[in-house]
Image (cartoon, helix red, strand yellow):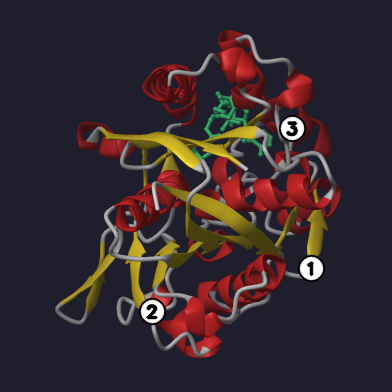
Amino acid sequence: ARWSKIVGTGSFLPERVVSNDQLARDLAERGIETSDQWIVERTGIRQRHLAEKGVTSSELGFEACVRALADAGVDASEVDLIIVATSTPDFVFPSTACLIQAKLGASNAAAFDVQAVCSGFVYALTTADSFIQAGRAKCALVIGTEVFSRILDWNDRGTCVLFGDGAGAVVLRASNEPGVLSAKLHSDGSQMKILCAAGNVAYGEVTGDPFLRMEGQAVFKQAVTVLDKVAREVCDEANVSLDSVDWLIPHQANVRILNSTARKLGIPLERVVVTVDSHANTSAASVPLALDVARRDGRIQPGQLVMLQGVGGGFTWGAVLARM
Ligand code: ACO
């Protein structure tokens, strides 16, 4: 097979929806002031789904996989590769991919996690595509799943209002028809400090700061620059024009980042999939969640060209261009 192709998608969100107003009321009880108006104006976020305490990434990811496999008409036994993108794994080890494999009974699969924060899904999809193109796998589950609510400092209004929990998955299969056309990944570890959760357990003690910390404006500037650049790189590599991209599906961090990226690329907003309003930022889950939403509501049609983009902690970024 010359290509890998997305043949099914699925997603899963925890049931509990927390509106900005509800969150503002909850935070007010801790003496922290925020408002629906501030959050909507600065981010476009209106609500988020939050997992109940104890719910894990593998549980959300498993549900997304069940839906993706059903959509593809693929049995778990046919899956020979499972790659999970997450920064909120259930455990240090085993990997969340192994936990999902066990829940699915996908006993013929190799399973491992990748960690590239909000770029994680694009990293995982690129990895799975490379396995399939090299002939080392035929049918992969690629999953982004997160419970970021677990690593938020609920006393820091500058970050805790921005994130939500959820999972998305795709089935990627070897194909004789065009699927993934090009992919490009980047990192800049020298910028680690603008977005990190630098806590650790070492020698029986928790060291560092376990919560997510972010320099919002530095992340914003970096994100709009690199999303523009990498979009052009994947189009050049596939030898297609930006005009021919039917759907732009960027990482869903902030509607202002999405709008500014679309404007720079000359892609009309009607061709950008936006879910940040209802999901908030679900890190590695945001891109496969948005892809699944837009496939299921009929926007994305077979044969259309989609561009998936990730950007986040590391600093990391990347894009995948795929024919659906
Ligand atoms: N409610 C009310 N006021 C707030 C809140 C809040 N939730 N959070 C911050 N403020 C206040 C600040 O204290 C500050 O007050 P001050 O002027 O009295 O000091 C004021 O609002 C402005 O704060 P800034 O941080 O300068 O606000 P900014 O306009 O930069 O918006 C934001 C912050 C939304 C985080 C923005 O920088 C941003 O979107 N950055 C991009 C980062 C992002 O989206 N990250 C997501 C993760 S990264 C990723 O996924 C790629």
Quadrant of res 239: top left
Whole-number angstrom distance, CA of label 1 to CA of label 2:
32 Å
**Residue on which the image places disc 3:** 44
Residue with the mark numbered 1: 16
Residue at horizontal 58 percent and vertical 46 percent from the top:
287
Task: Tell me, yes or no, whether the two marked residues, 3 and 1, touch with CB atoms within 8 Å.
Answer: no
Q: Is residue 180 above or below residue 263?
A: below
Estimate how packed mark 3 is, as few (under 14), some (14 to 19) or many (20 or more) residues with alpha carbons within 10 Å.
Answer: many
> Horizontal and vertical percent for residue 164?
64, 55
**Residue at point 59% right, 80% down?**
75
Between disc 1 and disc 2, whose residue precedes? 1
- For the residue pair 158 and 222, the one nearer the viewer reads as 222
The percent coordinates of residue 284 (x first, y second) are: 50, 52
Q: Where does ligand 1 appear, by image quarter?
A: top right
Q: Residue 273 sits in which quadrant?
A: top right
Instruction: Note whether residue 34 is visible.
Output: no
Residue 251: x, y in percent? 56, 39
Residue 266 image label: none
* Structural crowding at the residue carrying mark 2, measured as other residues with C-alpha within 10 Å and reported as few (<14), some (14–19) or many (≥20): many
Residue pointed to by mark 2: 109
Comes first in the chain, label 3 or label 1 = 1
Q: How many marks?
A: 3
* 116 lies above or below 166: above
In the depicted view, which residue is nearer to us: 18 or 69? 69
Q: Residues within 10 Å of mark 1 (few under 14, many from 20)?
A: few
At label 3, the amino acid type is Gly
In the image: residue 120, left or right of residue 147: left
